[in-house]
Amino acid sequence: MTVKNEQFPQGFLWGGATAANQIEGGFYEGNKGLNIADVLPGGKERLKVLKEPGFNFEIDKTKYNYPNHEAIDFYHRYKEDIKLFAEMGFKVFRMSIAWSRIFPKGTELEPNEEGLAFYDRVFDELHKYGIEPVVTISHYEMPLNLVKEYSGWKSREVIPLFERYASAVLNRYKGKVKYWMTFNEINSALHFPIMSMGFSVQEGENKYQKIFQAFHHQFVASSLAVKACREIIPEAKIGCMLLHAPVYSYDSNPENILYALQEEQIFNYFCGDVQVRGEYPGYAKRFFEENLVDILMEDGDLDLIKDYTVDYIGLSYYMSQTQKKEKEGLDTAAGNLLEGVKNPFLKASDWGWEIDPTGLRIGLNRLYGRYQIPLFVVENGLGAYDKIEDDGLINDDYRIDYLRSHIEAMAEAIKDGVDLMGYTSWGCIDLVSASTGEFSKRYGFIYVDKHDDGSGTLNRERKKSFYWYKDVIKSNGEVL
Ligand code: BGP
């Protein structure tokens, strides 16, 4: 344990992060409709379907298991879980609302009262302990009906449906939620459009045309949500949410540096440039020309995007990426979600995600330098296999090391001048992994007895990191 000088501002928002589809379960309860996450299989099949074209959005019980159906049963156990978050001293709890609980098919004119009432109960429970909710309006769980009827965000017709949903939750929870975000990891669609956009790119299709057109629809929808938020809850803060994985050049060859810069622009900056600066960036023009992308827009879209930019940037940070123009002969960072080459200076998690706390400091500096609006690290953590010892303890020192090094990197970034609002570590309670559909890829301070084959009592246990994080929060990041 190291004791440091005061480095986090007073009021820093410490907490943990989750998403509805990865914790709630109760997939048919409270009149909820099916959503994308409900049809994603678990285990090895998950990554396969996310990467392959032609995914069909149906449940096939004979072939796969569907881990999100029960998840960790937060739907019924939220009180017990929130009590544990309070015990750790959380100031905030990041969660998402499942769109299909509020509008089961996405097309109804009126919201589903049972769905609304569930989140009322959750928010009330959080407030009972003085925990502020941080709410993502859409986190990888679009109603399945919209996927089937409209091919998800490919279609412009989804925009007013999303606007109706966003307005419904903003109105309902105006007295209860101060921090909002629109689309989770909006830029992740460049790798996995299924989860956030509700379609897969088919063989022979121009991937970029499909994805950037859908981005445009999401940008308009996001600005409409910002507009609604300003009108309904003027004192609230509403952000975008970006998957941030800073790009390094493999070496000092200017060709590789240029390539890394272009990857950085398209993957790390494009969505932020539109959502924060309110306009399509200059480099996009050339990228669109070279990739035969022609975005269909309507009158008023660009004005709306310009007028309703976000208040802060929520970001996830798990890894950096190292890029080289010609990759032949080099190891790729195989397990990485992002297709870079292996960085010889970094170790990786059991899933091949390269561990790079300095990359967080670099990323925060780059983002703040570019946008000059507050940043909020709303996801960061280590997916790891945990073992219950004979004495019942879970000694996850590897997780503590990971988190400590990333919190130190944030402290350095704050000293560098970055305006950082808070930190919600990902998967504060074990949950279903988004990319693998596994329970065994655990992130939590709280262990949940649930396994990849679906077995388990669902009992909750405090890990060693639980007590460590409690001290971190209590000391406002001084005791690490
Ligand atoms: C982000 C998602 C989360 C979460 C996290 C960890 O991409 O926003 O939903 O799951 O990554 O990823 P994974 O669960 O694949 O380990």
Image (cartoon, rainbow, N blue to C red):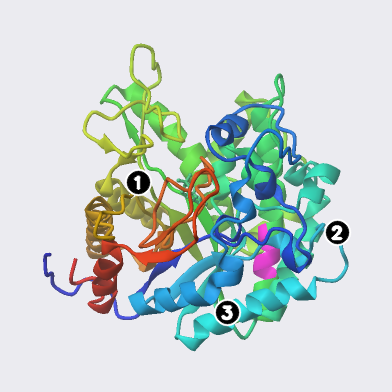
What residue do we see at 60% from left, 34% from top? 50
What residue do we see at 64% from left, 67% from top? 226
Q: Amino acid at mark 1?
A: Ala
Place of residue 21 in the rendered image (x, y in percent of width and height, measured from the top left): 61, 56
Label 3 crowding class (10 Å Cα cut-off): few <14, some 14-19, many 20+?
some
**Front: mark 2 or 3:** 3
In the displayed structure, would residue 92 be above or below residue 211? Answer: below
Q: Amino acid at mark 2?
A: Thr
Magenta region: 222-227
Label 2 crowding class (10 Å Cα cut-off): few <14, some 14-19, many 20+?
some
Mark number, residue 445: none
Q: Which residue is mark 3?
A: 123
Instruction: Point out the tag, 2 or 3, that comes first from the N-terminus.
Output: 2
- Chief SS of the magenta region: helix
Place of residue 43 in the rendered image (x, y in percent of width and height, measured from the top left): 53, 37
**Front: mark 2 or 1:** 1
Q: Are marks 2 and 1 in contact (CB under 8 Å)?
A: no
Q: Which residue is mark 2?
A: 107
- The answer to which image quadrant residue 287 occupies is top right
Instruction: Point out the tag, 3 or 1, that comes first from the N-terminus.
Output: 3
In the rendered image, the quadrant that contains the N terminus is bottom left
CA gap between label 2 and label 1 equals 39 Å
> Which residue is nearer to you in this view: 415 or 456?
456
CA gap between label 3 and label 1 equals 30 Å
* Secondary structure at numbered mark 1: loop
Q: Which residue is mark 1?
A: 384
What residue do we see at 50% from left, 39% from top? 267
Place of residue 432 in the rendered image (x, y in percent of width and height, measured from the top left): 52, 51
**Front: mark 3 or 1:** 1
